[in-house]
Amino acid sequence: MKRRERWHKVLQTEVARWSNKSCDQLRAELKDSKEYEVVFESVIHQVEVELLENTAAYVHVSVAVDDGTLPASICPASTSFIRKDA
């Protein structure tokens, strides 16, 4: 599997994990951005999760993934999602 394909697999997994949380959980856990590592196919990947918008009606969260190799990691695989308040 190519580098970017691995990144997108990790990105899908991390977006699913974070998007399953409630707005209150996301607000509490993302007061500061989160940076952590996960291993996929024996390769360490860096994940960054950040709260982009925090409104009364929704939160907007960004998730980015790379493997720390330059120059490829200058442009990580990333996406965002909106979680509406119940």
Image: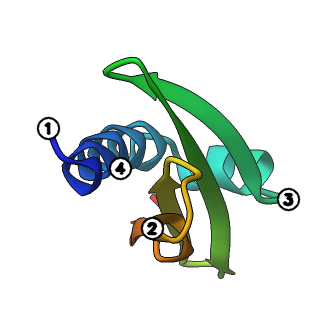
* Amino acid residing under circle 3: Asp
Q: Are marks 3 and 1 in contact (CB under 8 Å)?
A: no
Is label 4 in contact with label 2 (beta carbons under 8 Å)?
no
Query: Which label is found at residue 80?
Result: none
For residue 72, the mark is 2
Q: Which is nearer the N-term, disc 4 or disc 2? A: 4
Which residue is label 1 attached to? Answer: 1
Residue corresponding to mark 4: 11
Question: What separation in Å lies between label 1 and label 4 (alpha carbons)?
Answer: 15 Å
Distance between mark 4 and mark 2 Cα atoms: 16 Å
In front: label 4 or label 2:
2
Measured from the top left, where is residue 1 in percent x and y? 14, 38
Q: Report which residue position mark 3 lands on.
A: 32
* Residue 73 visible somewhere in the drawing: yes
In the rendered structure, which amino acid carries the disc numbered 2? Ala
Q: Nearer the viewer, mark 1 or mark 4?
A: 1
Q: N-terminal of the two: label 1 or label 4? A: 1
- Is residue 85 among the parts visible in the rendering? no
Crowding near pointer 2: few (<14 within 10 Å), some, many (20+)?
few
Give the crowd class for mark 3: few <14, some 14-19, many >=20 residues within 10 Å.
few
Mark 2 lies on a secondary structure that is helix
Q: Secondary structure at mark 4?
A: helix
Q: Quadrant of residue 78?
A: bottom left
Q: Position of residue 41 (x, y in %)?
A: 31, 21
Disc 4 marks a residue whose amino acid type is Leu
Inter-mark Cα distance, 2 to 3: 26 Å
The reply to whether discs 2 and 3 touch (Cβ–Cβ < 8 Å) is: no
